[in-house]
Image (cartoon, helix red, strand yellow):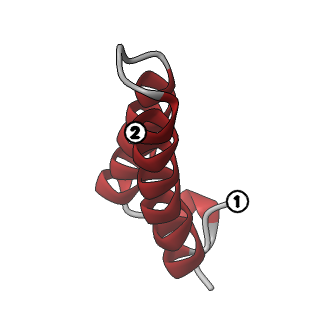
Amino acid sequence: MKNLHTQNPSIKNRIAALKARAISALHANSSLKVRLDRYNAAMQKARALENQGGVK
């Protein structure tokens, strides 16, 4: 498991972007189901990257 300080900055940026996308999906002008689906998809990808890279 990698230390947070040795984590690849591009991975951390990707995780942050996915989390931002997830939050913005909740505020979109779409149906609740579509917003939740987009939020869950983005957060699932972010969590997978966190688990893969050892980011907490």
Q: Look at label 2 and name its amino acid.
A: Val
The residue depicted at 37 percent of the width and 62 percent of the height is: 8
Residue furthest to the right: 56
Q: Are marks 1 and 2 in contact (CB under 8 Å)?
A: no
Query: Mark 1 and mark 2: span between their CA atoms?
Result: 28 Å
Of mark 1 and mark 2, the one earlier in the sequence is 2
- Taking the image as shown, residue 3 lies to the left or right of residue 36, namely right
The residue depicted at 29 percent of the width and 53 percent of the height is: 10
Q: Position of residue 37 (x, y in %)?
A: 45, 49
Crowding around mark 1 (Cα neighbors within 10 Å: few <14, some 14 to 19, many 20+) is few
Crowding around mark 2 (Cα neighbors within 10 Å: few <14, some 14 to 19, many 20+) is some
The residue depicted at 35 percent of the width and 13 percent of the height is: 29
Q: Position of residue 11 (x, y in %)?
A: 36, 59
Q: Nearer the viewer, residue 50 or 3?
A: 50
The secondary element bearing badge 2 is classed as helix
Q: Is residue 3 above or below residue 16?
A: below
Q: Is residue 41 above or below residue 51?
A: above
Q: Is residue 45 above or below residue 52?
A: above
The secondary element bearing badge 1 is classed as loop
- Quadrant holding the C terminus: bottom right
Which of label 1 and label 2 is nearer to you? 2
Q: Look at label 1 and name its amino acid.
A: Lys
Which residue is the site of mark 1?
56
Q: Nearer the viewer, residue 22 or 38?
A: 38
Which residue is the site of mark 2?
34
The residue depicted at 38 percent of the width and 18 percent of the height is: 28
